[in-house]
Amino acid sequence: MVEWIISEGLTGYDEAVAFMEARAAAIAEGTAEEAIWLVEHPPLYTAGTSARIEDLTDPDRFPVYESKRGGQYTYHGPGQRVAYVMLNVAKRGRDVRCFVRQLEQWVIATLDEFNVKGEIRDGRVGVWVVRGDKPLGVTGQPQEDKIAAIGIRLRKWVSFHGISINVEPDLEHFTGIVPCGITEHGVTSLVDLGLPVTMADVDVALKRRFEEVFGSQSAPAN
């Protein structure tokens, strides 16, 4: 069984990391069920294990947290749904690449609930959307904006950290970093795309599509 936990309000980043690490350890020991934890954070930046200091363009703007997840700099804040994924990858095939692909498929399937076509790009982490409503870029190709980020860590074959989907964050907050080290593309959200989507809508879609992708039973959400 996978327990679904939804936290109201804004969850501090240190609190989130402490919870994830404790839960992941308990899952590895067999004393706790797998869990998906849905949160929102106050505005902050996180630096993954591949972060480059030059990509933190406004270091005094929001708190910056060193994160042990993979990836580079990301922004978290109100209006962004963060799904922390604490799953036993050892019992799910011990294939990290397959697991990451499943996370990508989960995000894409969730976006599909709102008729948004999310896509993966080689060399660009995360999930992207083609912007047919914006001018062509310098290459003559349609603009592509990032709508979701993915970054995980495994300890004793249990995952933590996870995914984030931009529902209705302040997109200007992303300008304090080079998101994931990518300068030639922008950032968008479901509401920025013109969709009147709420956080509760996204939560329902995440849970429904999770079961399709991962094939796991779920315990009721808290």
Image (tube, rainbow, N blue to C red):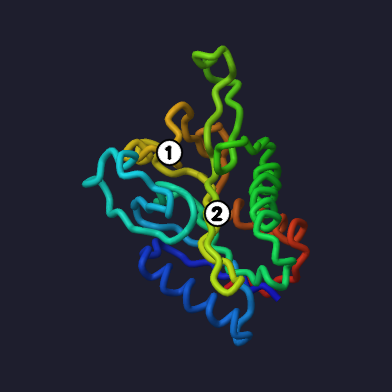
Residue bearing mark 1: 181
Q: Is residue 31 above or below residue 113?
A: below
Residue bearing mark 2: 163
Q: Residue at x 68, y 51 (%)?
A: 101
Residue 144: image x %, image y %? Answer: 56, 28
Residue 110: image x %, image y %? Answer: 67, 48
Q: Residue at x 47, y 30 (%)?
A: 186
Q: Residue at x 51, y 53 (%)?
A: 81
1 left or right, relative to 10: right
Give the quarter of the figure containing the N terminus: bottom right
How many discs mark residues in the rendered view?
2
Mark 1 vs mark 2: give the one in front. 1
Q: Is residue 6 above or below residue 138?
A: below
Residue 72: image x %, image y %? Answer: 43, 47
Say what amino acid the circle numbered 1 marks: Gly
Q: Secondary structure at mark 2?
A: strand
